[in-house]
Each structure stands twice: as structure tokens, then as C-alpha cells.
Image (tube, rainbow, N blue to C red):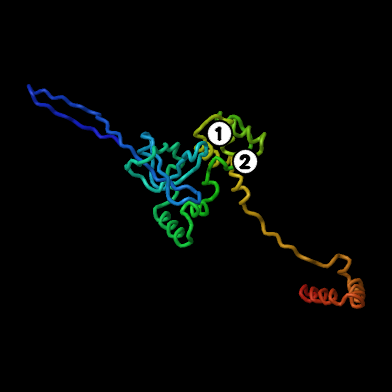
Amino acid sequence: MTRNFMLILSGNELRIAIFALMERVTLFAEVLLPIPVAGTFTYRVPFDLNDQISIGQRVAIQFGRRRVVAGLIKKIHENVPTGHLPKYILSILDKEPLVLPVQFTFWQWISEYYMCTEGEVMAAALPSVFKLSSESRVVLHPGFVPDREILGTTEYHITEALLQKNRLTIEELTDLVGIAKILPILKSMIEHHLIVMEEELSEAYKPKIEKLVRLADWALEEDSLRQVMDDLGKRAHKQLELLMAFIGLAGF
């Protein structure tokens, strides 16, 4: 946030103007994470992101020593935390809010009603593609076609690594590529159908399969079927009853 001031001094009709006196506002964000821990976590907003950040956006944050997680901005304020020094938000993952305030309110109601944390509700509510973390596994999109000309250097290295390893965690990709802020790159690759989350792939639509029974081809002939029924009548009455029921249902 920038505020401009002008100071006018009179004296011998001399005016001195002072422009661009900058006042830096430090913002903090309460971030909701998809974990079974109550409450939110406070992170500091980098100054260059002050005008871009808003409630409901996903941000990449460091949680613990090395773990990187995508969380949701639930609140933005200027209150300096006491007792600890907040870490900086690494990057913003969404241009527009992914979750609206009314949804946060609903999640809070769900957590109170079912006696769980809002983080657990978030984990259940968001599709896997939106829940990025260091442990998330990435695979190539089923329709991916290698094309060096349309890929940037980082995207090319990521796809090459996945072609060799089949699946990699985001942490492994971070180490291979050597870029700390890799989540925005992966988000873009997901949007361009270059990669998918392994969990998302496993949750893809599976056709419903029904197992059906029918008479064997040789039993479709009347004489053969009559012979089978005679044999079953002599030694397997239950099987004969089942066969008769099947014939009745099948409309023979």
C-alpha cells in the first residue's frame, strides 16, 4: 500500500514538494490447512503481494522444516503476532478466490456439528487437484504428448523426470528441478493438462460393471435343456429349482 504526501512551505513564495513518501503496511494472513489441527496458522504476506492477496485464495506456505503445503487464506490483518516470528507466504496460487466467505462459515458449522476440525472439512471438500503438498504424487496426464517446443525449461525437466520415474512427489520434483517455489509451476501444468495428481487419477470415473449369467450356447437347444433338467431332477433338486427360476425370469 502506497500513500503520497505533499508538504508545502511558504517563504519567498518558495514551495517545496515532497512526493512518494512511502508507508509500508505489513500484512499477515490466517491460513487454513487441510490437516486435523484446530485453528489457522499465521503467515506474513510479502510486501510485493499486498495488492494481490485476498481471502479465499490458495497460497503455498512452508509447514515445518521442509514440507510445502497449499492452504487457504481465511483472514487478512495487520496484527503482529506475539511469541513467534511468522514465516513468509511463498506464493499465491490463485488469481481469484477459490472459496467464498459463506463457504468458510459453512465449513465452520460442519466442524462444530460433526466435532472435527475445519482443516478436516477442507480436506474432504476440496478436490485432490487443489490439495497440493510436498507429499502429493504427480504423474503425467494420460493424454500427454512430448513436445519440447511448447515446454519451458522447467516444464521440460519435470516431464522428462516423470517419463523416467512414472510418478514423483512434489518434494522429489523440487529437489530435481532445484526450484523452491514449484507449486505455481505445477498448477500451471495441471491447468494445461500436462500432469495430474495421482489421487485425482485414481478418483477418475470408472464404468459400472455388472456380472450377468446366461445359459451356455449348447443348453439353448430344447432337447439339450430337457436332458439337463432330467439329470438334475435325479440328483440335484436345488440346482433344478434354481435353473427353473432362471428360465422363468429369462422368459424362455
- Spatial CA span between label 1 and label 2: 14 Å
- In this orientation, which residue lies closer to the viewer: 237 or 66? 66
At 44% from the left and 48% from the top, the residue drawn is 32
Residue 243, horizontal then vertical, whole percent: 83, 74
- In this orientation, which residue lies closer to the viewer: 216 or 105? 105
User: Considering the image in quadrants, where does the N terminus appear?
Assistant: top left
Residue at mark 1: 174
Circle 1 packing at 10 Å, graded few (<14), some (14-19), many (20+), is some
Sequence-wise, which precedes: disc 1 or disc 2? 2
At 62% from the left and 38% from the top, the residue drawn is 168
Residue 65, horizontal then vertical, whole percent: 50, 36
- In this orientation, which residue lies closer to the viewer: 108 or 18? 108
Quarter where residue 53 is shown:
top left
Disc 1 marks a residue whose amino acid type is: Thr
- In this orientation, which residue lies closer to the viewer: 12 or 249? 12
Q: Is residue 155 above or below residue 196?
A: above
Q: Which mark is residue 139?
A: 2
Front label number (1 vs 2): 1
Quarter where residue 252 is shown:
bottom right
Disc 1 is placed on an element classified as: helix
Residue 93, horizontal then vertical, whole percent: 46, 41
Q: Which mark is residue 238?
A: none
Circle 2 packing at 10 Å, graded few (<14), some (14-19), many (20+), is many
Residue 178, horizontal then vertical, whole percent: 55, 29
Disc 2 is placed on an element classified as: strand
